[in-house]
Amino acid sequence: MPHIPAETAPRFENDHASFVGLAAPSRGSAENSAWRLTIKPGVDAPPHALDREEIFIALSGSMNVTMDGETFTVTAGDALIVPAHQQFAMANPSEEPFEAVVVLPVGGQGLIPGQPPVIAPWAR
């Protein structure tokens, strides 16, 4: 079983968040990808969906999630299960980052309106 030390895990960043790649095919995982997600303070991330179920395990901070017309808050210790093809949006209105470990089956693709499906680099 491969060991991915935190200091060697690949890091990625966009305007909304940072990602630390943990498990993925490029790091020896055959069935699931996992990464550490940090949503920056004050961020309203654009709506998106995935073609596979995605699971978030909140580690610190909080985020607001809008899904099916309902908005709720996910806080440290919570789990969020997003069904495949379910559009949702995440926001972090606080002054503290939101951190979570996220799990997605290998090959899961992000579905962003108006863009082709994509496999995120932290999940490859």
Image: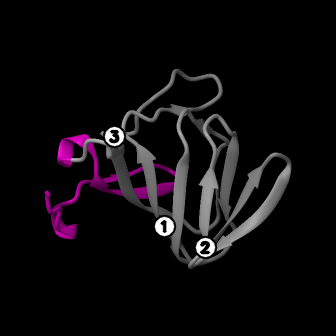
In this view of the protein, which residue sits in the foreground, 43 or 70?
70
Report the Cα–Cα distance between label 2 and label 1.
9 Å
Q: To which residue does mark 3 refer? A: 121
How far across and how far down the image is residue 30, in percent? 26, 42
At a point 62% along the width and 77% down the height, the residue shown is 95
Residue 107 position (above or below residue 95): above
How far across and how far down the image is residue 92, in percent? 65, 65
Q: To which residue does mark 2 refer? A: 78
Sequence-earlier tag: 2 or 3: 2
Sequence-earlier tag: 1 or 3: 1
Which contiguous range is marked in magenta?
A: 1-28
SS at circle 1:
strand
Horizontal side, residue 122 vs residue 50: left or right: left
How far across and how far down the image is residue 104, in percent? 44, 47
Q: Is residue 23 magenta?
A: yes
- Asked whether residue 98 is in view, the answer is no
Q: To which residue does mark 1 refer? A: 100
Sequence-earlier tag: 2 or 1: 2
Is the residue under label 3 in contact with that under label 1 (CB below 8 Å)? no
